[in-house]
Amino acid sequence: MSALEFEIEERESAVDVGALLADAAPVRRCACGSVRLGDEIVHGDGACRPMVRLRQVVERAAFPAPEVTSRDSWDGVTGCPAVVLARAESARRASWGVRVQRSKGCAPHASHGAPGALKWRYAVRFARPGRGAYAVHDGTGWKSVMLWGRDRTMFALASVTDLGEYLSAGGEMSDAWYQGIRARLAEAEQRKREAAKVRPKTRREGMS
């Protein structure tokens, strides 16, 4: 398996994207909700700006296989962070089908794709008729969330708090809810740019 390539098994449903992320697939996002899984692009809602192709410093390098994959046998509890189990139980009470998976491997570095540290990752997959979601936890915090449905393609911009709202509402969220998430992230990005403009330059940055 190469640094930025992952095989998606057609025999399984779209919910298995969560398992792929637990197996350390790299994610690239844009503001519209599109997501890149390896070299594949899954479009989110609305018009999508062109995805910026990240420079691959490590080109097709041999990538270490996971020590444990999401398809290996596991009881779904042993060693799993309490916050992951709590999220799964909360979803079950809200009548979602839930599956907890884990994997252990080296995730590609976000910038250059080289293998990172060996880590456990835990994916919680949620399903009900016409709706689905997943969230991935790396043992220290939630690292990615994805939402989708019969009338909505994959949406990669939600936070774990947004996921809680989505699950509580049975996945029946309005367009305004999704637009609110986009607006929130756009405002945060704008504040970040403005803060960068007024930040004093370091000595290195000021050198010509």
Image: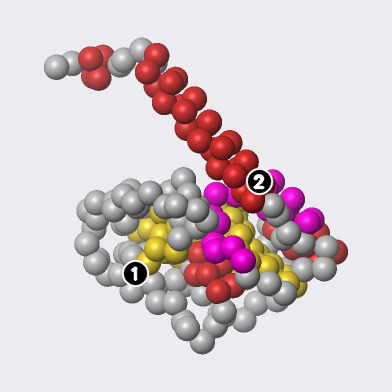
Considering only order in the chain, which callout, 1 or 2, is on the residue closer to the N terminus? 1
Residue type at mark 2: give it.
Ala
Question: In the shown orientation, is residue 16 left or right of residue 24?
Answer: right
**Residue in view at x 43 percent, y 21 percent:** 194
Label 2 Cα neighbours within 10 Å, binned few <14 / some 14-19 / many ≥20: few
Query: How many numbered discs sit on the rendered protein?
Result: 2
Q: Mark 1 = which residue? A: 5
Q: Is residue 85 left or right of residue 115?
A: right
Mark 2 lies on residue: 176
At mark 1, the secondary structure is loop
Q: What is the quadrant of the N terminus in the image?
A: bottom left
Mark linked to residue 42: none
Q: Are marks 2 and 1 in contact (CB under 8 Å)?
A: no
Q: Which residue appears at 31% of the width and 15% of the height?
A: 201
Amino acid type, label 1: Glu
Could you say whether the residue bearing mark 2 is in a helix, strand or loop? helix
Report the residue at 50% width, 64% height from top: 21
